[in-house]
Image (tube, helix red, strand yellow):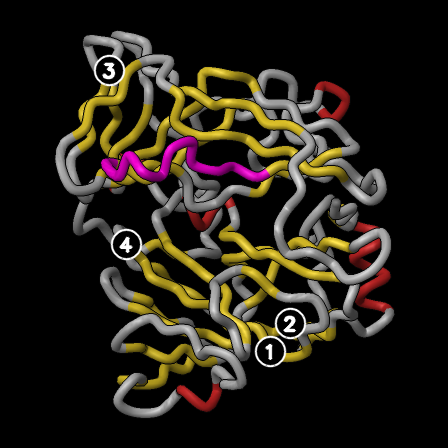
C-alpha cells in the first residue's frame, strides 16, 4: 500500500532550496500555498492547431513547428488569448524530481471560474497533469479559453502544482484517499442559485482583480422551482449544498461523482488546501463553488442532486500557514464568482 503524502508549504520551500524546483525569475511572495505552488507563464505563447501529448522519449519543444504551430505570440506587452483557440506556454518553473516525489497539477480556482481550460504537459508525457517520479525537465501549460477571451502577461498564474512524497521507496502517481464526501447542488426555489456565462462578452484582464462588472459577463439564475435545466455548451457557476471543511492535516481534490453520465461536466479546478472552510482559519460555512458545463443535450439538475465527490488525502506535515490565514480570496465563500469580478450591483 502506498504511503505517499502531500507536501506542505515549508516542505515545498525546502524543494526550492534543494533545487528540486527551479525557476527563471525569483518566486513571488505568495506563490507557495499551504499544499500547492502556483505556476507562472513564460514569455511566449504558441497558437496550436490541436492539442497533443508528446509521448515517451519525445520533448515538447521538438513538436513546436509547423504544421502543429500556427504562430508565436510575445506575451511581454500583454496578449489576448481568444476563445475557441488552443495555446501552449512554457512555464517559468522547472522540475528535478527525485524518485520518491511525484506531482499533479490543476487549474487555479480563479482560472476554472472563468471557463479557461488548462492542462500541464511534460516531456515524454502520455497523460496531462500527472508528473512521474524522477522527472527532470520543463513544464508547459496548454490554455484554451472556452467562454471569455483573456489578457495575459508573463508571470500570470493559471495553474498550480502539488507534490507527493512516498514514505519509503518510489512514489506512486495514483493518489491515496483517506476518505471522501459527496457534494450536492444548492438549487432552492426563488433564490439566487448561480450564474450563466454570457457569450461574446469583453476581454478579461487577469491582473484587474475586482475590475470587471459581473453584469457584463454573467446572467443571474433564480429558478422558480428547485431545479435548473443546463443548456448544451453553456457554462454555469453553482454552489454546493454542503459546507466544506478541510482540516489542517488533510488536503482534498474535487472529482466528478459519475463521469459516465456524460450530460454535464463538473469542475475545472479541484484543489482544496488545508484550512479551507476551517473555523480556526476563518472559513466556517464555506461552500464549494462548482464550475459546470452542459454537454450533448439539455439536462435537468435538481436541488440536492449529488454531482461530485471531495476526495481527502493526508498531508506529510501540517502547513505553517493554513488557507485563509494569509488573505485567501475564497475563504468562507458562498456562491461566488472569480476574484476578477466586482460586486453585483
The magenta segment: 253-263
Q: Is residue 279 visible?
A: yes
- Residue to which mark 4 is pinned: 146
Q: Earlier in the sequence, mark 3 or mark 2?
A: 2
Residue found 48% across the figure and 64% down from its top: 127
Q: CA distance from mark 3 to mark 1?
A: 45 Å
Q: Nearer the viewer, mark 3 or mark 4?
A: 3
Relative to 252, residue 12 above or below = below
Relative to 161, residue 93 above or below = below
Relative to 112, residue 246 above or below = above
Q: Position of residue 209 (x, y in %)?
A: 48, 47
- Residue to which mark 1 is pinned: 138
Foreground: 276 or 270? 270
Q: Secondary structure at mark 4?
A: loop
Q: Earlier in the sequence, mark 2 or mark 1?
A: 2
Q: Secondary structure at mark 3?
A: strand
Q: Nearer the viewer, mark 1 or mark 4?
A: 1
Residue found 44% across the figure and 56% down from its top: 206
- The verdict on residue 269 being magenta is no
State if disc 1 and disc 3 touch (CB < 8 Å): no
Q: Nearer the viewer, mark 3 or mark 2?
A: 3
Q: Earlier in the sequence, mark 1 or mark 4?
A: 1
Foreground: 199 or 85? 85
- Residue to which mark 3 is pinned: 227
Amino acid at each position: 500500500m502506498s504511503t505517499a503524502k502531500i507536501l506542505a508549504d515549508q516542505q515545498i520551500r525546502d524543494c526550492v532550496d534543494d533545487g528540486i524546483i527551479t525557476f527563471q525569475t525569483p518566486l513571488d511572495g505568495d506563490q507557495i500555498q499551504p499544499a500547492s505552488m502556483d505556476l507562472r507563464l513564460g514569455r511566449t505563447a504558441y497558437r496550436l492547431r490541436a492539442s497533443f501529448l508528446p509521448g515517451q522519449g519525445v520533448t515538447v519543444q521538438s513538436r513546436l513547428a509547423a504544421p502543429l504551430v500556427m504562430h508565436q505570440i510575445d506575451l511581454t506587452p500583454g496578449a489576448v488569448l481568444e476563445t475557441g483557440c488552443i495555446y501552449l506556454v512554457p512555464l517559468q518553473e522547472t522540475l528535478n524530481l527525485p524518485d520518491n516525489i511525484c506531482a499533479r497539477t490543476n487549474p487555479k480556482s480563479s482560472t476554472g471560474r472563468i471557463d479557461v481550460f488548462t492542462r500541464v504537459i511534460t516531456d515524454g508525457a502520455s497523460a496531462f497533469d500527472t508528473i512521474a517520479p524522477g522527472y527532470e525537465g520543463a513544464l508547459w501549460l496548454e490554455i484554451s479559453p472556452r467562454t471569455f477571451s483573456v489578457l495575459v502577461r508573463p508571470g500570470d498564474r493559471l495553474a498550480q502544482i502539488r507534490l507527493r512524497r512516498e514514505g519509503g521507496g518510489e512514489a506512486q502517481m495514483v493518489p491515496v484517499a483517506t476518505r471522501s464526501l459527496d457534494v450536492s447542488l444548492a438549487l432552492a426555489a426563488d433564490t439566487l442559485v448561480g450564474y450563466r456565462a454570457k457569450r461574446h462578452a469583453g476581454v478579461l484582464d487577469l491582473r484587474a482583480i475586482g475590475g470587471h462588472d459581473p453584469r457584463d459577463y454573467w446572467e443571474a439564475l433564480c429558478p422558480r422551482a428547485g431545479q435548473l435545466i443546463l443548456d448544451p455548451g453553456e457554462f454555469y457557476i453553482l454552489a454546493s449544498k454542503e459546507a466544506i471543511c478541510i482540516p489542517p492535516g488533510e488536503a482534498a481534490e474535487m472529482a466528478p461523482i459519475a463521469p459516465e453520465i456524460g450530460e454535464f461536466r463538473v469542475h475545472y479546478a479541484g484543489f482544496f488546501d488545508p484550512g479551507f472552510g476551517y473555523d480556526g482559519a476563518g472559513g466556517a460555512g464555506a461552500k464549494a463553488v462548482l464550475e459546470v458545463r452542459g454537454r450533448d443535450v439539455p439536462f435537468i439538475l435538481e436541488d440536492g442532486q449529488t454531482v461530485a465527490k471531495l476526495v481527502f488525502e493526508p498531508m506529510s506535515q501540517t502547513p505553517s500557514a493554513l488557507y485563509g490565514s494569509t488573505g485567501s480570496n475564497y475563504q468562507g465563500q458562498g456562491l461566488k464568482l472569480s476574484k476578477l469580478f466586482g460586486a453585483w450591483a
